[in-house]
Amino acid sequence: MTEAMIPLVVISGLSGSGKSSALHALEDLSYYCVDNLPGGLLAGLLEEIRSQPGRYPRVAIGIDARTGPDGLDRLIRLFDQLPDDEQFKLLFLDADESILIRRFSETRRRHPLASIGGLAAAIDRERELLAPVRQRADWVIDTSDSNIHQLRRQVWRTIAGAAGAGIQSIVLESFAFKRGVPRDIDMLFDARCLPNPHWEPNLRPRTGLDPEVATWLENSERVDAFSEDVLSFIQRWLPALAEDQRSLLSIGIGCTGGQHRSVYLVDRIGAALRRADLPVVLAHRELDR
Protein backbone atom coordinates (compact mmCIF):
# COMPACT_ATOMS: atom_id res chain seq x y z
CA MET A 1 0.00 0.00 0.00
CA THR A 2 2.65 2.50 1.07
CA GLU A 3 5.21 1.44 -1.55
CA ALA A 4 3.50 3.60 -4.19
CA MET A 5 3.66 6.78 -2.11
CA ILE A 6 5.78 9.76 -3.15
CA PRO A 7 9.37 9.26 -1.85
CA LEU A 8 9.98 12.95 -1.14
CA VAL A 9 7.39 15.56 -0.15
CA VAL A 10 8.16 19.20 0.64
CA ILE A 11 5.53 20.94 2.74
CA SER A 12 5.38 24.72 2.69
CA GLY A 13 2.80 27.36 3.36
CA LEU A 14 1.75 30.24 5.54
CA SER A 15 2.46 30.28 9.25
CA GLY A 16 -0.63 29.05 11.08
CA SER A 17 -1.95 27.10 8.10
CA GLY A 18 -1.21 23.69 9.64
CA LYS A 19 2.24 22.69 8.37
CA SER A 20 3.19 20.94 11.63
CA SER A 21 -0.06 18.95 11.60
CA ALA A 22 0.61 17.96 7.99
CA LEU A 23 4.09 16.70 8.89
CA HIS A 24 2.66 14.73 11.81
CA ALA A 25 0.15 13.15 9.42
CA LEU A 26 3.00 12.03 7.17
CA GLU A 27 4.88 10.63 10.16
CA ASP A 28 1.89 8.32 10.59
CA LEU A 29 2.52 7.14 7.02
CA SER A 30 6.12 6.24 7.98
CA TYR A 31 7.72 9.35 6.48
CA TYR A 32 11.00 10.58 7.95
CA CYS A 33 10.10 14.23 8.71
CA VAL A 34 12.34 17.28 8.97
CA ASP A 35 10.80 20.62 9.92
CA ASN A 36 12.08 24.16 9.29
CA LEU A 37 14.90 23.08 6.98
CA PRO A 38 16.83 26.05 5.54
CA GLY A 39 16.21 26.16 1.78
CA GLY A 40 19.91 26.21 1.07
CA LEU A 41 20.34 22.78 2.69
CA LEU A 42 17.70 21.03 0.59
CA ALA A 43 20.09 20.19 -2.29
CA GLY A 44 22.50 18.49 0.10
CA LEU A 45 19.68 16.57 1.76
CA LEU A 46 18.44 15.41 -1.64
CA GLU A 47 21.87 13.96 -2.40
CA GLU A 48 21.90 12.19 0.97
CA ILE A 49 18.45 10.71 0.29
CA ARG A 50 19.44 9.56 -3.22
CA SER A 51 22.61 7.92 -1.92
CA GLN A 52 20.79 5.95 0.81
CA PRO A 53 17.33 4.99 -0.52
CA GLY A 54 17.07 2.07 1.86
CA ARG A 55 17.58 4.33 4.87
CA TYR A 56 15.29 7.09 3.59
CA PRO A 57 12.48 5.43 1.57
CA ARG A 58 10.05 8.28 2.31
CA VAL A 59 10.99 11.78 3.49
CA ALA A 60 8.89 14.87 4.21
CA ILE A 61 10.49 18.28 4.65
CA GLY A 62 8.94 21.43 6.05
CA ILE A 63 10.23 24.68 4.53
CA ASP A 64 8.62 28.09 4.96
CA ALA A 65 9.32 31.81 5.20
CA ARG A 66 11.56 31.33 8.24
CA THR A 67 14.33 30.28 5.84
CA GLY A 68 14.42 33.87 4.54
CA PRO A 69 14.33 35.34 1.00
CA ASP A 70 17.72 33.85 0.05
CA GLY A 71 16.70 30.37 1.16
CA LEU A 72 13.42 30.63 -0.72
CA ASP A 73 15.23 31.76 -3.86
CA ARG A 74 17.52 28.73 -3.64
CA LEU A 75 14.50 26.53 -3.15
CA ILE A 76 12.82 27.90 -6.29
CA ARG A 77 16.00 27.45 -8.34
CA LEU A 78 16.25 23.87 -7.15
CA PHE A 79 12.63 23.21 -8.15
CA ASP A 80 13.39 24.54 -11.64
CA GLN A 81 16.48 22.32 -11.98
CA LEU A 82 14.85 19.05 -10.98
CA PRO A 83 14.21 16.61 -13.86
CA ASP A 84 10.63 15.93 -14.86
CA ASP A 85 10.83 12.33 -13.65
CA GLU A 86 12.03 13.30 -10.17
CA GLN A 87 9.86 11.58 -7.56
CA PHE A 88 9.36 14.79 -5.66
CA LYS A 89 6.20 16.72 -4.85
CA LEU A 90 5.42 20.04 -3.20
CA LEU A 91 2.38 20.51 -0.95
CA PHE A 92 1.41 24.09 -0.09
CA LEU A 93 -0.95 24.98 2.78
CA ASP A 94 -2.94 28.20 2.67
CA ALA A 95 -5.70 29.88 4.67
CA ASP A 96 -7.68 33.11 4.73
CA GLU A 97 -6.06 36.06 6.50
CA SER A 98 -8.88 36.34 9.02
CA ILE A 99 -8.49 32.68 9.95
CA LEU A 100 -4.74 33.02 10.37
CA ILE A 101 -5.17 36.07 12.58
CA ARG A 102 -7.69 34.21 14.73
CA ARG A 103 -5.38 31.20 15.08
CA PHE A 104 -2.46 33.35 16.15
CA SER A 105 -4.69 35.17 18.62
CA GLU A 106 -5.95 31.90 20.10
CA THR A 107 -2.52 30.30 20.44
CA ARG A 108 -0.74 33.57 21.41
CA ARG A 109 2.16 32.60 19.19
CA ARG A 110 4.43 35.18 17.59
CA HIS A 111 4.42 35.33 13.80
CA PRO A 112 7.91 34.71 12.33
CA LEU A 113 7.76 38.04 10.47
CA ALA A 114 6.13 40.04 13.26
CA SER A 115 9.12 42.39 13.48
CA ILE A 116 8.08 44.18 10.26
CA GLY A 117 4.83 45.47 11.78
CA GLY A 118 1.47 44.14 12.90
CA LEU A 119 0.13 40.63 12.38
CA ALA A 120 -1.81 41.50 9.24
CA ALA A 121 1.29 43.10 7.68
CA ALA A 122 3.38 40.04 8.59
CA ILE A 123 0.85 37.70 6.93
CA ASP A 124 0.77 39.84 3.79
CA ARG A 125 4.57 39.89 3.59
CA GLU A 126 4.79 36.13 4.11
CA ARG A 127 2.20 35.52 1.41
CA GLU A 128 4.26 37.69 -0.95
CA LEU A 129 7.49 35.83 -0.14
CA LEU A 130 5.88 32.42 -0.63
CA ALA A 131 3.97 33.28 -3.82
CA PRO A 132 6.63 31.70 -6.14
CA VAL A 133 6.58 28.53 -3.99
CA ARG A 134 2.80 28.34 -4.16
CA GLN A 135 2.92 28.71 -7.95
CA ARG A 136 5.14 25.63 -8.21
CA ALA A 137 3.09 23.50 -5.82
CA ASP A 138 1.72 20.18 -6.99
CA TRP A 139 -1.09 20.43 -4.45
CA VAL A 140 -2.61 23.36 -2.56
CA ILE A 141 -4.80 22.73 0.48
CA ASP A 142 -6.85 25.58 1.90
CA THR A 143 -7.17 24.86 5.62
CA SER A 144 -9.49 27.76 6.45
CA ASP A 145 -12.43 25.47 7.25
CA SER A 146 -10.44 22.45 8.48
CA ASN A 147 -9.69 21.32 12.00
CA ILE A 148 -6.59 19.28 12.84
CA HIS A 149 -8.26 15.91 12.24
CA GLN A 150 -9.79 16.98 8.92
CA LEU A 151 -6.42 18.31 7.76
CA ARG A 152 -4.68 15.04 8.60
CA ARG A 153 -7.23 13.15 6.51
CA GLN A 154 -6.80 15.63 3.64
CA VAL A 155 -3.05 15.12 3.71
CA TRP A 156 -3.44 11.34 3.78
CA ARG A 157 -5.78 11.42 0.80
CA THR A 158 -3.54 13.83 -1.10
CA ILE A 159 -0.21 12.10 -0.55
CA ALA A 160 -1.20 8.46 -0.27
CA GLY A 161 -4.64 8.27 -1.84
CA ALA A 162 -7.62 6.69 -0.13
CA ALA A 163 -5.84 3.37 0.26
CA GLY A 164 -2.81 4.83 1.95
CA ALA A 165 -4.54 6.44 4.90
CA GLY A 166 -4.73 3.20 6.83
CA ILE A 167 -3.72 1.91 10.22
CA GLN A 168 0.01 1.23 10.16
CA SER A 169 0.07 -1.31 12.98
CA ILE A 170 -2.46 -3.48 14.85
CA VAL A 171 -1.26 -4.76 18.22
CA LEU A 172 -3.10 -7.80 19.63
CA GLU A 173 -2.26 -8.50 23.28
CA SER A 174 -3.35 -11.28 25.60
CA PHE A 175 -3.43 -10.61 29.33
CA ALA A 176 -4.73 -11.78 32.71
CA PHE A 177 -7.55 -9.83 34.31
CA LYS A 178 -6.20 -10.81 37.73
CA ARG A 179 -3.10 -8.73 36.95
CA GLY A 180 -5.04 -5.75 35.66
CA VAL A 181 -6.10 -4.44 32.26
CA PRO A 182 -3.35 -2.94 30.03
CA ARG A 183 -3.60 0.83 30.18
CA ASP A 184 -2.87 1.61 26.53
CA ILE A 185 -5.46 -0.51 24.68
CA ASP A 186 -8.17 0.85 22.39
CA MET A 187 -10.45 -2.22 22.39
CA LEU A 188 -11.04 -4.78 25.14
CA PHE A 189 -12.56 -8.25 24.84
CA ASP A 190 -13.28 -10.48 27.84
CA ALA A 191 -12.81 -14.21 27.20
CA ARG A 192 -13.52 -15.36 30.77
CA CYS A 193 -16.94 -16.63 29.64
CA LEU A 194 -15.30 -19.38 27.57
CA PRO A 195 -14.43 -22.94 28.69
CA ASN A 196 -11.19 -22.90 30.69
CA PRO A 197 -8.40 -25.44 29.98
CA HIS A 198 -7.01 -24.63 33.44
CA TRP A 199 -9.39 -27.20 34.89
CA GLU A 200 -7.92 -29.97 32.74
CA PRO A 201 -4.90 -31.34 34.69
CA ASN A 202 -2.94 -32.31 31.55
CA LEU A 203 -3.52 -28.87 29.97
CA ARG A 204 -2.97 -26.70 33.05
CA PRO A 205 0.81 -26.30 32.63
CA ARG A 206 0.52 -25.61 28.90
CA THR A 207 -0.40 -22.39 27.05
CA GLY A 208 -2.75 -21.34 24.30
CA LEU A 209 0.14 -21.68 21.84
CA ASP A 210 0.36 -25.44 22.40
CA PRO A 211 -1.49 -27.67 19.91
CA GLU A 212 -3.17 -29.68 22.70
CA VAL A 213 -4.76 -26.55 24.17
CA ALA A 214 -5.73 -25.21 20.73
CA THR A 215 -7.42 -28.50 19.82
CA TRP A 216 -9.30 -28.58 23.12
CA LEU A 217 -10.59 -25.02 22.66
CA GLU A 218 -11.49 -25.56 19.01
CA ASN A 219 -13.89 -28.32 20.06
CA SER A 220 -16.04 -25.67 21.73
CA GLU A 221 -18.69 -23.94 19.59
CA ARG A 222 -18.65 -21.04 22.03
CA VAL A 223 -14.92 -20.46 21.51
CA ASP A 224 -15.35 -20.62 17.75
CA ALA A 225 -18.25 -18.15 17.80
CA PHE A 226 -16.36 -15.77 20.12
CA SER A 227 -13.30 -15.79 17.86
CA GLU A 228 -15.31 -15.20 14.68
CA ASP A 229 -17.35 -12.41 16.28
CA VAL A 230 -14.24 -10.56 17.48
CA LEU A 231 -12.55 -10.98 14.09
CA SER A 232 -15.63 -9.71 12.24
CA PHE A 233 -15.93 -6.74 14.60
CA ILE A 234 -12.30 -5.72 14.05
CA GLN A 235 -12.51 -6.10 10.27
CA ARG A 236 -15.79 -4.22 10.06
CA TRP A 237 -14.58 -1.19 12.02
CA LEU A 238 -11.00 -0.91 10.74
CA PRO A 239 -11.93 1.48 7.88
CA ALA A 240 -13.77 3.81 10.27
CA LEU A 241 -10.91 3.71 12.77
CA ALA A 242 -8.42 4.51 10.00
CA GLU A 243 -10.59 7.42 8.87
CA ASP A 244 -10.47 8.67 12.46
CA GLN A 245 -6.74 9.39 11.87
CA ARG A 246 -5.45 6.45 13.91
CA SER A 247 -2.09 5.01 12.92
CA LEU A 248 -1.92 2.43 15.74
CA LEU A 249 -4.72 0.20 17.03
CA SER A 250 -4.19 -1.75 20.27
CA ILE A 251 -6.58 -4.61 21.06
CA GLY A 252 -6.57 -6.52 24.32
CA ILE A 253 -8.10 -9.97 24.87
CA GLY A 254 -8.13 -11.10 28.48
CA CYS A 255 -8.92 -14.20 30.47
CA THR A 256 -8.42 -15.09 34.12
CA GLY A 257 -4.77 -16.11 34.01
CA GLY A 258 -3.63 -14.90 30.61
CA GLN A 259 -2.24 -18.32 29.78
CA HIS A 260 -4.77 -20.34 27.76
CA ARG A 261 -7.90 -18.74 26.27
CA SER A 262 -6.67 -15.22 25.60
CA VAL A 263 -3.34 -16.49 24.22
CA TYR A 264 -5.10 -18.88 21.85
CA LEU A 265 -7.54 -16.21 20.65
CA VAL A 266 -4.82 -13.61 20.01
CA ASP A 267 -2.84 -16.18 18.04
CA ARG A 268 -5.87 -17.29 16.01
CA ILE A 269 -7.27 -13.83 15.30
CA GLY A 270 -3.80 -12.45 14.54
CA ALA A 271 -3.21 -15.19 11.97
CA ALA A 272 -6.53 -14.39 10.28
CA LEU A 273 -5.69 -10.67 10.09
CA ARG A 274 -2.27 -11.45 8.64
CA ARG A 275 -3.88 -13.58 5.96
CA ALA A 276 -5.84 -10.45 5.06
CA ASP A 277 -2.45 -8.68 4.59
CA LEU A 278 -2.88 -6.46 7.65
CA PRO A 279 0.14 -5.29 9.73
CA VAL A 280 -0.26 -7.24 12.98
CA VAL A 281 1.98 -7.49 16.04
CA LEU A 282 1.20 -10.16 18.66
CA ALA A 283 2.03 -9.83 22.36
CA HIS A 284 1.32 -12.13 25.31
CA ARG A 285 1.82 -10.09 28.45
CA GLU A 286 1.81 -12.90 30.99
CA LEU A 287 3.87 -15.32 28.89
CA ASP A 288 6.52 -12.63 28.36
CA ARG A 289 7.01 -12.00 32.07
Image (tube, grey):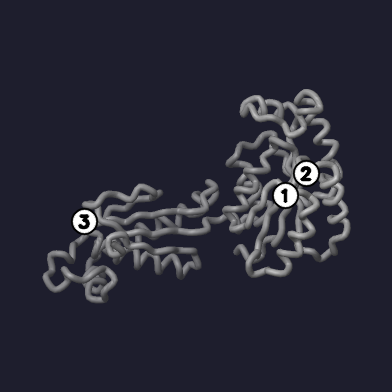
- Foreground label between 1 and 3: 1
Please tell me which of labels 3 and 2 falls first in the chain.
2
Tell me residue 207's x, y (percent).
24, 69
Please tell me which of labels 2 and 1 falls first in the chain.
1
Q: Residues within 10 Å of mark 1 (few under 14, many from 20)?
A: some
| Quarter of the image that includes the N terminus | bottom right
Report the front residue among 98 and 55: 55
Give the Cα separation between the discs numbered 2 and 1.
7 Å
On residue 67, which mark appears?
A: 2
Please report the residue visible at 70 percent of the width from the left and 34 percent of the height from the top: 144
Residue topped by disc 1: 37
In the image, residue 286 above or below residue 67:
below
In the image, residue 130 above or below residue 44:
above
- Find numbered disc 3 in the image and state the secondary structure of the residue it sits on: loop
On residue 256, which mark appears?
A: 3
Report the front residue among 216 and 13: 13
Left or right of residue 132, residue 139 in this image: left
Are circles 2 and 1 on residues that touch, CB within 8 Å?
yes
